[in-house]
Image (cartoon, grey):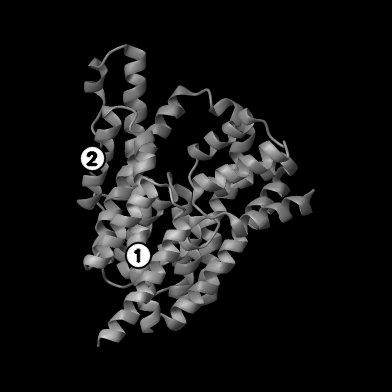
Amino acid sequence: MMWELARIFIRLGFTAFGGPAAHIAMFHDEFVKRRQWLTDQHFLDLLGATNLIPGPNSTEMAMHIGHVRAGWRGMIVAGACFILPAASLVLLLAWLYVTYQATPAANWLLYGIKPVIIAVIVQAIYNLGTKAAKSIFYVALMIGVLALYLLGINEIVLLFGGALLAMLIMNARRLTGGTAALAAIPPLQAVFWVQTAASIPVTLGELFLTFLKIGSVLYGSGYVLLAFLRTDFIERLGWLTDQQLLDAVAIGQFTPGPLFTTATFIGYVVADVPGAVLATLGIFLPGFVFVAIVNPLVPRLRQSTWLSALLDGVNAAAIGLMAAVTLELARAALIDWLTIALALMAGVLLIRYRVNSTWLILAGGLIGIAAALLVGVTR
């Protein structure tokens, strides 16, 4: 049974392109339709549970399926076998990046890929935002989080503050039957995080603990990871630049499996192979712990109105964070008419025609190389 789990999830780890939604669809086809290990209802309950805990949703879904099939050992096997193929590919690409990033070919390749990544993130914001905007309140919460993040408020405060505010407001209205109780709810405190751009010496301990913290508190889509990475590794520690962060996200998006393997790339860039290993372990370890705790409680979680409102608030705040970080990263990616055109065309193809993002990223890289050759010819 363990070998069967390992074989299936290694295969999925090498072929699961397209982001968390595509991963979930592949799991449903594999384990509900083809193998009938789960019913539709059980699958939906597990999916809901992944949204109630921090961490990468599709990876935690793999862990849940392994847990259902073979207990805690199955959880470890399924999770590890889904993560390792992507992490290995990202590690290889990180080595190539560090070795060859200064060459004109690598620069032009990333020149074409980065605008497409911006479009991919915008598509995720559009798709997730339409689902998270369940009322005017949640729209206002998204806009408020976006504005407060740009003003410098800590992203963890915004995530948990937004979740708490939504839970209190939605349940206050449910319990009182009106809006009068809203006045009694204390306002969200504006807690500011003092950011510093000064570089702090790289240590493996700091690297591991930073990714452990991120893996322990990050709700929402994998793209919310951008907000945490930017706050910690650019503004607080000074270990990365905006350009390097975009490159890391491009590699994470380009490879199959979880987007959280972006941590593998960053770990290698700042501290070689030991950094890659510790960064990967740090960001994924909390997910194993949370799944082990939550899996037996899944039948009860679905019925809680309080947890439902908490989750809605987390999702809305996460969308606001994604939008704010995308605005900042777009300044580094959209630098001329060609990159702006690439982002716009990719956005149309993603949103209107649902073209697979992997093909668009490949096309962006080829366009970047073609632009390099054209520049060389015209000189």
Q: CA distance from mark 2 to mark 1?
A: 27 Å
- Around disc 2, counting alpha carbons within 10 Å, would you say few (fewer than 14), some (14 to 19), or many (20 or more)? some
Q: Which residue lies at the image location 64% right of the left edge and 56% below the top edge?
A: 80
**Residue 101 in view (yes/no):** yes
**Residue 198 appears in which quarter of the rendering?**
bottom left
- Where disc 2 sits, the SS reads helix
What residue would you read off at disc 1?
114
**Residue 104 appears in which quarter of the rendering?**
bottom left
Which of the marked residues, 2 or 1, is nearer the chain's N terminus? 1
Q: Is residue 102 above or below residue 190?
A: below
Location of the C terminus (image quadrant):
bottom left
- Where disc 1 sits, the SS reads helix
- Around disc 1, counting alpha carbons within 10 Å, would you say few (fewer than 14), some (14 to 19), or many (20 or more)? many
Q: Is residue 123 above or below residue 330?
A: above
Residue type indicated by callout 2: Gly
Q: Which residue lies at the image location 68% right of the left edge and 34% below the top edge?
A: 38
Question: Which mark, by number, is residue 144?
Answer: 2
Q: Which residue lies at the image location 31% right of the left edge and 63% below the top edge?
A: 236
Q: Which residue lies at the image location 37% right of the left edge and 21% below the top edge?
A: 171
